[in-house]
Image (tube, rainbow, N blue to C red):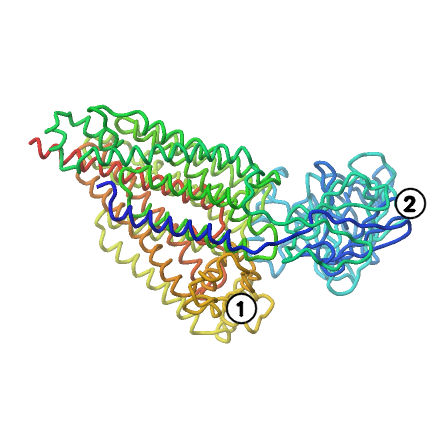
Amino acid sequence: MMRSRLFSATATLLLLLTALQAWSLLRAPAAWFPAAIEVRLDRGETITLGTRDLAAPSADRAHLQLRRDAGGAWLLRNLSTGRPVILYSGDDEQRMGSAPLAGLRQFQIGATVFAAPPQNGGRARFGASDTQFSFGGGTWRYDGATLYRNGQALPSCPDAHAASQLVALWNRAVPRAWTVARPLIFGGNLHCGNRLGLPGVDPGAAILARRAGQLQLSAGNQDGGHTALRITGIASSSPAIPDSIASINPQPADLRQQEQPLAEITAFSVGRTRYQIAPDTAGSSIKLLPARHVALFTAPDARLGPHLGWQWQQRELWNLRPAPLVLALLAVAIFALAIAGAAQGRGADAVPPAQGSTSASSSGASPRTARVQGTWGVVRNGTMAATDPTAMALASAALLAAGVAAVLAQRGGQPASAACSLLLGAAGLALWLIAPKRLPLPVAAALVLLAAGLLAQLELGLGAGESSWLRYYQKSTALLAAGSGAGGLWHCWNRTARGITPQRTIEWLLAIVAAAALAALAAQVLWGDETGVFDLQPVELAKLALTALTAHCLALRMGWNDPGYRQHGQAARLLQLAAPALLFLFLLGLALIQVDDYSPLILLLVWSLSMAFSYAMAAHKRAMAAGLAAMALAAVAGIAMVRGAGADGMAQWPLAGGFYADRFQVWLAPSAHPHTGQQLLLGARAIADGGWLGADSMLGLRSLGMSAGGAVNIPAVQDDFAPSFFLNRHGLLGAMLLWAGQAALVAGMLHLAGRACAAAAQARDFRHAWLGRFRYFALCGGAAFVLGHLLLSWGTNLAIFPIMGQPMSFLSAGGSHLLFFLCPLLAFCAVSAQSLEENLSCRSTSNTKS
C-alpha cells in the first residue's frame, strides 16, 4: 500500500524533527547587536578600536586606529600585525599594508633596496604582471607563479611537500595564463622555490603575490620583531594607484603603518566583520554599519567610551518580510504540495492494492490504464485527473525557484529569516515524501538524516554568540529546496516519459556533466583554492560525474557478451572505458596539487575499492572479491598498527620530519602539540562533556535554542567537526540513533543496487540489461562516496584517523555536497526504485496473463 509503515514512520520522524526546529526558534532567547556604530572625534583626535568596540569577534583587542586630521579628514590605520584590514571602493578591494607593484618607484625590505629608475633601466623593472630585478649577483624574474634566477627556475625547498612540487612543475610547463598563483616570500637564508633569502630578514617579512591580474607587495605577519618595509610611490593620477601611495612621493613610508583616507572608501573588513561607511565623512562623526559576523549581546547595555555610540537592533527570527519573493514562491509551492498530497491520498483510497493485474482486469481497465492508476494514484470514472501531475510539477518548479531566490537573497545581504528557512526545509522534505509512488528505504533514511542535520545546524546558529552563524542553516535549507525542486521536476518528467531513454542521449548527457565538472575543476585550479571557487566546491560535481561515467562504462563492459550488443574492436572497447579513468586522474591531480590534505586520496581509494568489489560481485569473480576484501582488512590492520606504535614509534619511521608525519604526530599525541592539536583537543573535550545523554542530560532537548557553550569554539565545527558538536549536544545515545540512520541509508542503497543487478540479469533486451547494470554501479558508487564521507568524518572526530577535512553527509553545512551530490543521488534512488517497481509489476502482469 502507498501509506506503508515505512512511509508513516518517516513522516512521523520528519514531523517530530521539524517541530523541534520550530521549538528551538520559539525558545531562543532575545539577542541584540549594534546596527550602527557612531564614532565622534574632534579635529586632531585619535581613537583605538578593537573587538569590544567594533563588536567584531575575530578582531584583536586593539585592531584599528581612527584619526581626524587638522583638515577634518578621516584616516584609518591597521594596528594588527597578524590580521589585515580589507578596504573596498566600488568593485575594487585593497588590503591595508599592501600596494600595487606598478605604482612604486622603489621598496626597501630590511637593508635591501629594490628600485625602478626612470625609463625602466638599471637594475629593476616593475610591471603589472611580472617583475625583473638584480640582486646578489644575478638577474631575477617573478611572474606571479615562479621565481627565476638567470632564466632558470629555482629548485624546490627542502621542506616542500609533494603538492607544492607538483604545482611548481605545472607552472613551469604551462603558459602564464594557466599558472597557479604562488606568492614570492622575502626573508630567510635560502634561495629556493618561491623564497628570496635576504640577510638579516626573518622569513615572511614581505610577500609579493599576484592578485586581480597585478602584482601586489604586502607586509608579512610579524609575530616577533619588526622588519623595516618602506615604499616610495610615483606621482600618478591613474585610478589603479591608490592616493595613499601617490601621496607619499617622494618620501618613503612604512607600509605597515600606512594610513588610508576614508573619503573614497565605501566599506572595510576587520577579521570576518564587514563595515559599511556612511557617505558623510566630513563631519565630526562617522557611522559604521556592521554587515556580518557581528557579536550578539543578551541585553542592549554594553558600556562604551565617550567617543562611541551604538544603535541597537534585536535579532529577528520570525520576521518574514526581508525576502518577499522567497515567501511568495514558497507559498505557491506549499499550496501545490497540499493539493498533490490530498489528491494522492484520495487516489490511494480509490485504487485497491496491486495484485498483479487482477484489479485492473476485473474493472475492465487495460494494463496501460492500470499502470497510469498506479503511477498517479488519482482515478475519476476510469480516467486520470490532471490535478496531481500539474500540482507536482508546479510545486517542484516553485520550490526550485524559491531555493534559488533564497540563495541570491543571502548573497545580496538580505537573507530570508530563520522562520522562512524552516518552511523552505520542511517543504523540501515534504516533496520527497509525496513525489515517489512508494517511498524507498534509502530515500526515507536520507530524509530523516537531512532533518536531523538541519536541526543540528539550527542549534549551532542559535547557540553561537555571533549573528552570521545562522547563515549555514539558511544556506542548507535554500539549497535543499533547490535540489528537491530539481529532483521533483526530474521525477515528473520520468513519470511522463515513454520507454527507455536512448543510450546515445544518456551518453551525451553524461559527456555534458563531465565537461562541466572538468571546467569547474580547472576554474578552481586557476582562480580558487582548496575551499573552492566562486563559493562552490566543483569536486562535488566531479564526484557525481565520476560515479555516473564509471557506472556507464562498467555497464557497457559487462554487456559486451550480451545478445544483440553491437560489437566493436578491442581498441574501441577500451576507449569506452577511458573517460572515467581520465576524470579520476584529474581528480587525483587536483587532490595532490590544490588540497593541502590527504583526505581526498583516502576518499578516492575507498570509492575505487568499492567499485572494484561491486564489479567483482556482479561478474562473479570470487577471487578478485576476496583479494579486495583482504586489502580492506589490511588497511584496517595498518591503522591499528600505526595507532599502536604511538608518537615515539612514529618518530623512528622514515620521512618522520615530513608534513604528513607531523599530522600523525599531532594525532597520536595531541597534548604534546597544544597549538596544532587544538582542533582535536577541543573536539575530544566536547565529546567527553556530552557523555551518553548530552551536555544537558536530556539528549539535547533541554538546551534547544540555548547557548552552544564551548563547543562552538572548535575550528570548523559547522563542517568537518559537526559530529563533535552533535555528540556534545545529543550525547552518544543520539549518535547511535544517527548511526542507525546512516547504516539504513547505505544498506538501502546497496539493496536497491542488488535489485537492479538482478533485474539486469533477467532482462531479455540488451538495452534493459544495460540500464539495470548502470543503476547497479551508479548506486554502488554513490553509496561508496557516502560511506567514505561517513568513515572519514567519524574517524576524524573520534580520533580514529588523523585530522582530515571531509564534511559529514547530511549533518555538516556542506552546501555544494548537498546540492551537487546528495540531492541528485536521492533523485536517482527514487527514480530507480519506481522503475524497478514498475518492471516487477509488468512481469507480474505477464505471468498472470500467461
For disc 1, the neighbor class at 10 Å (few under 14, some 14 to 19, many from 20) is some
Residue type (three-letter) at the residue carrying disc 1: Leu
Q: CA distance from mark 2 to mark 1?
A: 52 Å
Judged from the image, the secondary structure of the residue bearing numbered disc 1 is helix
Q: How far across and how far down the image is residue 257, in percent?
A: 82, 54
Viewer can see residue 174? no
Taking the spot 9% from the left edge, 34% from the top edge, the residue there is 848
Query: Picture coordinates of residue 543 (x, y %)?
Result: 43, 44
Asked which quadrant contains residue 380, the reply is top left
Residue 270 at x, y = what percent? 71, 51
Amino acid of disc 2: Pro
When asked about the image quadrant of residue 91, the answer is: top right
**Earlier-in-chain disc, 2 versus 1:** 2
Residue 250, label in figure: 2
Q: Residues within 10 Å of mark 2 (few under 14, many from 20)?
A: few
CB atoms of marks 2 and 1 within 8 Å: no
Residue occupying image coordinates x 88% and y 53%: 45
**Residue, x 32% and y 52% (percent of image)?**
746
Identify residue for label 1: 681
Q: Work out which quarter of the rendered image holds the N terminus and state it.
A: top left
Q: Is residue 290 left or right of residue 510?
A: right
User: Is the C terminus in the top left, top right, bottom left or bottom right quadrant?
Assistant: top left
Nearest to viewer (mark 2 / mark 1) = 1
Q: Nearer the viewer, residue 74 or 15?
A: 15
